[in-house]
Image (spheres, rainbow, N blue to C red):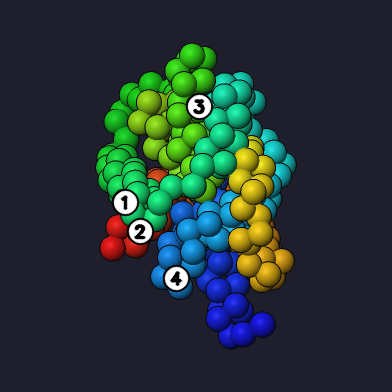
Amino acid sequence: MDTEVFWLAGVFLVIAVIYAAVGQAGASGYIAIMALFGFAPLAMKTTALALNLMVAAIGTAWFMKSGRLSWRNIYPFAVLGFPFSMLGGSIQLAEGVYYPIVGAILVLSALQMARSAMKRPAGNVAPPKTPPFLAALATGALIGFVSGTTGTGGGVFLAPVILAMRWGTARQTAATTAVYNLMNSAAALIGAYAYWDQIPASLPLWLAAVAVGGTVGAFVGSRYLSDRWLRGILAALLLASGVKLLL
C-alpha cells in the first residue's frame, strides 16, 4: 500500500469522528475527499456507502445504548426509504450531473442548519411533535431514492427536514438519522452490487479507520454535545462538503 492509502485512512478517521458525533456517518465527507483525489464516480459511490454503513452501525449501537432512539419516530422514514434507496443504488449518474446535485443540496441544507443553530431559544417553545406517518413515508421514499443514487446514505438530507418541521430535537434527530443512514446505506449498497468490483482494494483498512473514528464520535455526540453545538457542527460539515463538490 502506498502513502496515499494510509493518508486517506487518517482523513477518513477524522471525518468519521466529526460526523458520528452528530448522528451522521460521513458519506458526503468521504465523497468530497475522494473527489479531490480523482476517484472515479463508481468507486466513490460504493466506497462511501461501505464506509457509511460501518459508521452508521456504530452510531446506532451507541444511541441505542444511551436510550435515545424512538422507533416510532424512525420506522415511518424507513418503510419506503429502504426499497427506494436500493433502487437509487442501482442507478449511476453522469459525473456532470452527480456533483452539482449533491453539492447544491448540501449547501442549502447547511444554510438551514446554520440558521437554526444561531436562533436563540424562545421562552415558551412547543415540544417537538411526532412525524405524521404519511409525510414521513413520503420523505423517507424521496430521500431514500436521492441518497441511494448519490451514495450519501440519506441522513445528511433527512436531518434538516426533521429539524425544520420540528419532528424532533437535535439530539433525537441525530439518533434517527444514525438508524436511517444504517438502513439506507445497506439498501443502496445492495442495489449497487453490479458495481462492487469498483471498490478499491484498500477498503478493509479504511473500514477499520472509520470504525475507530465512528466509535469515538458516537460516544462524544451521544453524551456530551449540546443541541446547539450539534446543529452548528453539522451545518459546517454540510457547507464544506457541498462547496467541495460544487468547485
161 or 5, which lies in front? Answer: 5
Of the numbered discs 1 and 3, the one sitting upstream in the chain is: 1
Q: Earlier in the sequence, mark 2 or mark 4?
A: 4
What amino acid type is highlighted by mark number 1? Pro
Q: How far apart are marks 1 and 3 (CA)?
A: 21 Å
Query: In this orientation, which residue lies closer to the viewer: 172 or 105?
Result: 105
Residue sticking out furthest to the bottom: 3
Of circles 4 and 3, the one toward us is 4
What residue type is disc 4 on? Gly
x, y percentage for residue 120? 28, 39
Name above or below for residue 232 compared with residue 18. Answer: above
Residue at figure coordinates x 45%, y 29% from the top left: 142
Tag 2 and tag 1, C-beta contact below 8 Å:
yes
Q: Of callouts 1 and 4, which one flags the residue occurring earlier in the amino acid sequence?
A: 4
Q: Residue 237 carries which label?
A: none
**First in sequence: mark 2 or mark 3?**
3
Instruction: Determine the image quadrant of residue 61.
Output: top right
Residue marked by disc 3: 141
Q: Characterize the local packing of mark 2: few (<14), some (14-19) or many (20 or more) Cα atoms within 10 angstroms.
A: many
Marked residue nearer the N-terminal end (2 or 1): 1
Q: Disc 1 marks which residue?
A: 100
Q: Which label was assigned to residue 38? A: 4
Residue 99 relative to residue 140: left or right: left
Residue 213, given in percent of the width and then of the height, sits at 62, 63
Amino acid marked by disc 3: Ala
Q: Which mark is residue 245?
A: 2
Q: Do the residues labelled 2 and 3 touch (CB within 8 Å)?
A: no
Name the mark nearer the viewer: 2 or 4: 4
**Label 4 to label 3: alpha-carbon separation:** 31 Å
In the rendered image, is residue 149 in sight? yes
Closer to us: 232 or 131: 131
